[in-house]
Image: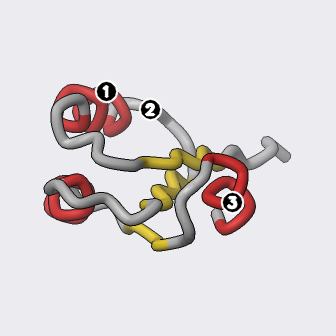
C-alpha cells in the first residue's frame, strides 16, 4: 500500500506568486493539498479557490497555519 501524501501550504498575501505556484501544484500526484490563509488582504484566497483548491483560515503565523492545516 502506498503512503498518502498531503501538502500543507501556509499563505499570507501571496497573490503575486500564486498563479504560477497553483499551475505547478496541479501537476503533482498528491492526495491532498491544504492551503491555510493567515488573514490575507489581497486576492490570495480567491485565486486558490478559483483554481479548484480549498483554503482554510487561521490566525497569522506559519506555525499556527501549519498546525491548523
Nearest-to-viewer mark from 1 and 3: 3
Element assignment for label 1 = helix
In percent of width and height, residue 49 lies at 23, 64
The residue that appears at 38% across and 65% down in the rendered structure is: 39
Q: Residue 14 or 31: which is nearer the viewer?
A: 14
Alpha-carbon neighbours of circle 1 within 10 Å: few (<14), some, or many (≥20)?
A: few
Mark positioned earlier in the residue sequence (1 or 3): 1
Q: Tell me how far mark 2 sits from mark 1, CA to CA.
A: 7 Å
The residue that appears at 52% across and 57% down in the rendered structure is: 34
Residue 45, compared with residue 19, is above or below; it is: below
Element assignment for label 3 = helix
Nearest-to-viewer mark from 2 and 1: 1
In percent of width and height, residue 48 lies at 26, 56
Q: In which image quadrant can residue 24 be found?
A: top left
Q: Tell me how far mark 2 sits from mark 3, CA to CA.
A: 25 Å
Instruction: Identify the residue position indicated by label 1 in the image.
Output: 24
Residue 17, compared with residue 5, is above or below; it is: above
Residues under numbered marks 2 and 1 in contact, where contact means CB atoms less than 8 Å apart: yes
Say left or right for 56 vs 67: left
Instruction: Identify the residue position indicated by label 3 in the image.
Output: 64
Nearest-to-viewer mark from 2 and 3: 3
Element assignment for label 2 = loop
Q: Residue furthest right?
A: 1
In percent of width and height, residue 45 lies at 26, 62
Tell me how the rendering is colored: secondary structure
Instruction: Identify the residue position indicated by label 2 in the image.
Output: 28
Numbered badge on residue 1: none
Mark positioned earlier in the residue sequence (2 or 3): 2
Say left or right for 64 vs 45: right
Amino acid at each position: 500500500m502506498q503512503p498518502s501524501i498531503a501538502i500543507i501550504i501556509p499563505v499570507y498575501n501571496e497573490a503575486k506568486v500564486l498563479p504560477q505556484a497553483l499551475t505547478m501544484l496541479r501537476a503533482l500526484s498528491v492526495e491532498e493539498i491544504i492551503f491555510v490563509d493567515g488573514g490575507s488582504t489581497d486576492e490570495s484566497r480567491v485565486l486558490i479557490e478559483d483554481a479548484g483548491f480549498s483554503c482554510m483560515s487561521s490566525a497569522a503565523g506559519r506555525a499556527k497555519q501549519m498546525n491548523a492545516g
